[in-house]
Amino acid sequence: MFELDTADFRRIDTMLGMQFLSSSEKYNIMKIYFSKFGATIDTSDKKTVKITSEFRIRVTSEGIQDFFNSGNNLSRPFTLVKYSSNVGDKYEFTDMDNKKITREVVYKSTDNDYEIGFFRIKVMKIDEIEDDPMYKKITYVANHKYGLVGIIITLNNNKTVTLSLSPANM
């Protein structure tokens, strides 16, 4: 669950370049994402808006699969990363709207070159490019020991949003 206040919404709005869109255009974009991620929004408290979503992933020693694009259908996983993959390998999926989504391994470390906390680790970077109203691509950064360690979102206005994920067992 995410809790946001009005100032948070304004910052996100500006970061995404949406501050000039009408309220109905923003609402339509939110509807797309809320539907995709099965999210709900509670605006009963105007000071603290709550966004809730349940998501499922499968993490194994071989890689990570998600169920976002299948509406959390556990019989339809989409590979996020397979640690034995090499640069150029692709993972393809057709979502519930019959839209094809492709993820491609674009980088694989041979040295400990990715900084996370006080450590440097080897990583793979997987790009997901799809026709989306908000972003050009999402780059997932994964490590064979710690799993997903970062997400880089390249927005349509060429700004990037970087999320660093710190594994609990580091």
Image: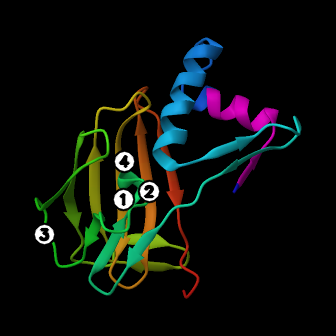
- The Cα–Cα distance between marks 4 and 3, rounded to whole angstroms, is 18 Å
Q: Quick check: 87 above or below 51?
A: below
Dot 4 surroundings within 10 Å: few (below 14), some, or many (20 or more)? many
Q: How is the image coloured?
A: rainbow
Q: Which residue in the structure is indicated by mark 4? A: 138
Q: Quick check: 4 above or below 17?
A: below
| Element class at badge 2 | strand
Image side of residue 160 versus residue 106, left or right: right
Question: Residue visible at 86% across and 38% down?
Answer: 44
Q: Identify the disc placed on residue 140.
A: 1
Residue 72 position by quadrant = bottom left
Callout 3 amino acid: Asn
| Element class at badge 4 | strand
Callout 4 amino acid: Ile
Question: Residue visible at 62% across and 18% down?
Answer: 19
Image side of residue 130 versus residue 87, left or right: right
**Do the CB atoms of the residues marked 2 and 4 lie less than 8 Å apart?**
yes
Q: Identify the disc placed on residue 151.
A: 2
- The Cα–Cα distance between marks 2 and 4, rounded to whole angstroms, is 7 Å
- The Cα–Cα distance between marks 2 and 1, rounded to whole angstroms, is 5 Å
Q: Reading the chain from its start, which is encountered first: label 4 or label 3?
A: 3
Near-viewer residue (129 or 37) = 37
Q: Reading the chain from its start, which is encountered first: label 3 or label 1?
A: 3
Q: Reading the chain from its start, which is encountered first: label 2 or label 3?
A: 3
**Do the CB atoms of the residues marked 2 and 3 lie less than 8 Å apart?**
no
Question: Residue visible at 31% across and 68% down?
Answer: 75
- The Cα–Cα distance between marks 3 and 1, rounded to whole angstroms, is 15 Å
Q: Main secondary structure of the magenta part?
A: helix
Q: Which residues are magenta?
A: 2-13
Callout 1 amino acid: Tyr
Q: On the rendered image, what quadrant is the C terminus found in? A: bottom right
